Image (cartoon, coloured by chain):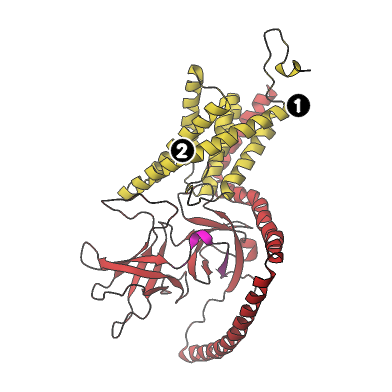
Amino acid sequence: MKQTKLWVWLLVLSFGALVFWRSGFCDFSREALYPYENALGWFERTFWLRAQAVFSRARQASRNAMLERDVARLQLVAGEAEALEAEVVRLRALLDFSPPVPCRWLAAPVISRGGTSEVWQRVRLAKGSLHGVRKGDPVVVPEGVAGRVIDVSPHTSEVMLVTDPNSRVSCELEVPGEGVGVVRGILYGGGSIPSADPKLSLLYVVDPLRLRYLTREFEPAPRTRVVTSGLGQTFPKGLTVGYLLESRLEPNGLSREASVMPAVDMAGLDEVFILATGGGHAP
Amino acid sequence: MRLDMNLPVVAFTLFAAALLQDMIPATPALPVKIGFLTAVALYHMLTKPVLVALTALVWAGGVTDALGGLPAFCTISFLLAAYGAVRLLKRMFLEATLVQGTLLVACAAVVQTVWTRAWLGLSEPASVWHALVAAGYAVPAGLVAGCAGFAVCGLIDRVSGNKKPVKEANGILWAETDR
């Protein structure tokens, strides 16, 4: 009888938690799995990569030499960037512009891809609100934009990739052409392109993204770089999102729509950078 | 009060299933998630009393929805419907054997894939096509999940003492006949 009471109470409490404490339940689930998922990543970084390094000394030496050359080159670039930054700050002060939002780069390992369902294009990172991550923070890798943070728990954050069908990013074409001006549009995620003749394709392969509401007068060349416009307030201006494949007029003839190949290989994401507006460690 | 061993078994198996399902990514060879949580929930539905089975399915569904970014009660409602079907099939022929369990999970994985897409309202032609392709891939994923889920849960149930060896008509355990 006591056992029955226990199970009835458990059932009632579980239902109660799901109905009245949904967001807390989501955070609790992620936090419960976090130590184990993070431990696997830590093991890989600490032991597995070192073990691999032992067997590839020669390759490491040549890679080190290459990286040292890169560091020297980047130091020169950083010096120029500092001078430019000082100039920008001075000109901003002269023009009475509002100062840019202070933010920090925060490296974060990927601990889960897609969660327990493959419906959405999401990844989970091992950095959360305790590290200064906030909802809406952009997530990037050296190749370009990966996505943005849509949910945060103390140690983890959920990232919606730009390839998710629900993703929208304000973008523009880089250097569209002589006398064309700025060509802006809204980048829609892939995964749900209506088609009268759907073809068999692996779900794992990402559909091209769609850049919509481009001006109809200008036909952009294939392989044009698509960058963030900075108008959506989420992503800073000028980050690479992808490369244009082809463009065509929309059925209503009012604007142009283009297919865009993402710049980032979403399946290969292991470590990303969060542009944390709420603090974080200095780069 | 003596602890009901079903509680730690349910909690441990669901936790392990959630961890595996969350960590194992979709790959080009198998571009869907392997539904370990559904497999464990179905095992408990087949082998446990009503209250234990209901608690297990609520936890399994809740965690699937929470970690998968799905709307609340999407998976729980599917598992409740599955529980009704399982109880009906149990009266006719269904038993908690490894083979039947594996086939049951494979069928459930296909229905769950379509159910989830329908719940999300993805009704565009390409989305319907994607749902059908995903349902096709759900068969091997379900077979893997069912085989692993039923084998491991059965083992844990035996180790924890929830499942007793079958007695013969004379009252001697099969396990004792070899001694």
- Residue A3 visible in the picture: yes
- Name the chain under label 1: B
The hue of chain A in the figure is red
Left or right of A60? Residue B96 is: left
In this rendering, is residue B9 above or below A260?
above
Which of the two marks, 1 or 2, is nearer to us in this view? Answer: 2
Q: Which chain is yellow?
A: B
Q: Same chain, marks 1 and 2? A: yes
For residue A218, which quarter of the picture?
bottom left
Specify start and end residues of the magenta stretch as a single range. Answer: A263-277
The label on residue B123 is: none
In the rendered image, the quadrant that contains the N terminus of chain A is: top right
- Location of the C terminus of chain A by quadrant is bottom right
Which residue lies at the image location 25% right of the left edge and 67% below the top edge? A248
Residue A213, position in %: x, y? 30, 68
Q: Amino acid at mark 2?
A: Val
Dot placed on the residue nearer the N-terminal end, 1 or 2? 1
Residue B2 is marked as 1
Residue A269 in the image: state x and y as whole percent: 54, 62
Left or right: residue A127 compared with residue B38: right
Name the one closer to the observer, A63 or A148. Answer: A63
The furthest residue to the top: B170
Magenta segment includes A262: no
Left or right of A211? Residue A140 is: right
Q: CA distance from mark 1 to mark 2?
A: 41 Å
Q: Nearer the viewer, residue A208 or B30?
A: B30
The 10 Å Cα crowd at callout 1, few under 14, some 14 to 19, many 20 or more, is few
Q: Position of residue A115 (x, y in %)?
A: 54, 50
Residue for badge 2: B139
Q: Can I make out residue B38 in this image?
A: no
Determine the secondary structure under disc 2: helix
